[in-house]
Image: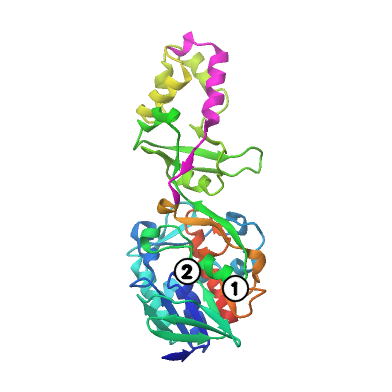
Amino acid sequence: MNETYDAIVLGAGAAGLFCAATAGQRGRRVLLIDHAPEPGRKIVISGGGRCNFTNLHTAPDRYLSNNPHFAKSALSRYTPADFLALVESHGIAWHEKTLGQLFCDGSARQIVAMLLDECARGGVVLRCGVELGDVTQADGLYRVPHGGQVASAPALVIATGGPSIPKMGASGFAYDLARRFGLKVVQPRPALVPLTLPADEALFRELSGVSTEIVARCGEGKKSPAFREAALFTHRGLSGPAILQISSYWKRGDTVTAQFLPDRLDGWLRVLKRERPRLSFRKALGDGLPERLAEALCGRLGLEGELGALTDKALAAAEARLMRWPFVPDGSEGFAKAEVTVGGIDTAELSSRTMEAKRAPGLYAIGEGVDVIGWLGGYNFQWAWASARAAGLAL
């Protein structure tokens, strides 16, 4: 059976659903296809089941891409306030957590239901749980075999995401399809992912489950990224929001530094020595750190005893080390644990205004499959909405 549409959207995740709804409500006949049995699977598990659906502090400098300017157009034309207005129009209660992160009061499924309702308003035809055949293009039409049928349309949108969280059905399909139509792909790698430590850092593995606030950095110089949030020691290495954030910038061989006790002023140990000379070095650290971590750091620093018995030089060296404690990860926990993907379809191949491929008329790419990745905390959902809106308005 052959069917003809104005546009076919591949992938019923955040970007695909919103793009299909946008185009459908503009009068386009849209087919939305996904191999998963139900739409929005990643949305459902996001934000601990409550969906961190946007971030109030969204700005282009909070995104990574080979072209840092690419995301500006879409993000400026569809903002967090725009999406929040949509959420409120559906009666979904929400709240702000830290750092501008917005979550549903109830369930992430409310966002999926909202997007499906928007699709229904646009008359979108949704088919889930169907396998795709080879996608081809001829005579100005893209042909998509699926579930024993063949659909064709002059426009095809790649919204299948990246390979992060493969247990949810994620794959590199978007990249394969882009390459088939001549588009370049920036080498993908896991992002927002826990980092693993080599065997010589085994001492810290004994701290599995211990968490503390740090400033995490990667690289040198004033422009090197820095994130002040919690870090979590795991049996394999480092995790927690600060580490997930810095992992997007980390490359093999890079040193990640942790600033412990970030509120302490320069010289604080020497001041404390003069004020409380009989205080032990371990207790001085334990005043602001979990006990097990303070003990481990004391062991690594090789300092014991009362502050008054330690030289100012030794205390200054300890302060410097605590300010930039170096870790050299030997890898990450990979796409299986990554929330998103760095890299993807090269933005040089796409129009920043419409997301259409420059060398393949009628072919669009949106969402995580594109070489644009945001910080942790709702930024990637906002990119999904903004890029989807840009394409949906152009279809």
For the view shown, which residue lies furthest in the top direction? Answer: 309
Disc 1 to disc 2, C-alpha distance: 16 Å
- Classify 249 as above or below 323: below
Where residue 220 appears, x then y in whole percent?
A: 64, 37
Asked whether residue 100 appears in the rendered view, the answer is yes
Where residue 60 appears, x then y in whole percent?
A: 61, 59
Where residue 106 appears, x then y in whole percent?
A: 32, 64
Q: Which residue is mark 2?
A: 160
Disc 2 is placed on an element classified as loop
Where residue 334 appears, x then y in whole percent?
A: 45, 49
- Tell me the amino acid under the disc marked 1: Phe
**Left or right of residue 113, residue 308 in this image:** right
Q: Residue drawn at (51%, 69%), measured in percent from left and top? A: 385
Asked whether residue 25 appears in the rendered view, the answer is no
Which mark lies nearer to you, 1 or 2? 1
Q: Residues within 10 Å of mark 1 (few under 14, many from 20)?
A: some
- Tell me the amino acid under the disc marked 2: Thr
Say whether residue 114 is magenta: no
For the view shown, which residue lies furthest in the front direction? Answer: 134
Say whether disc 1 or disc 2 marks the residue closer to the N-terminus.
2
Q: Which mark is residue 181?
A: 1
- Classify 291 as above or below 70: above
Q: How many marks?
A: 2
User: In the rendered structure, which segment of residues is drawn in magenta?
Assistant: 306-334
Q: Which mark is residue 376?
A: none
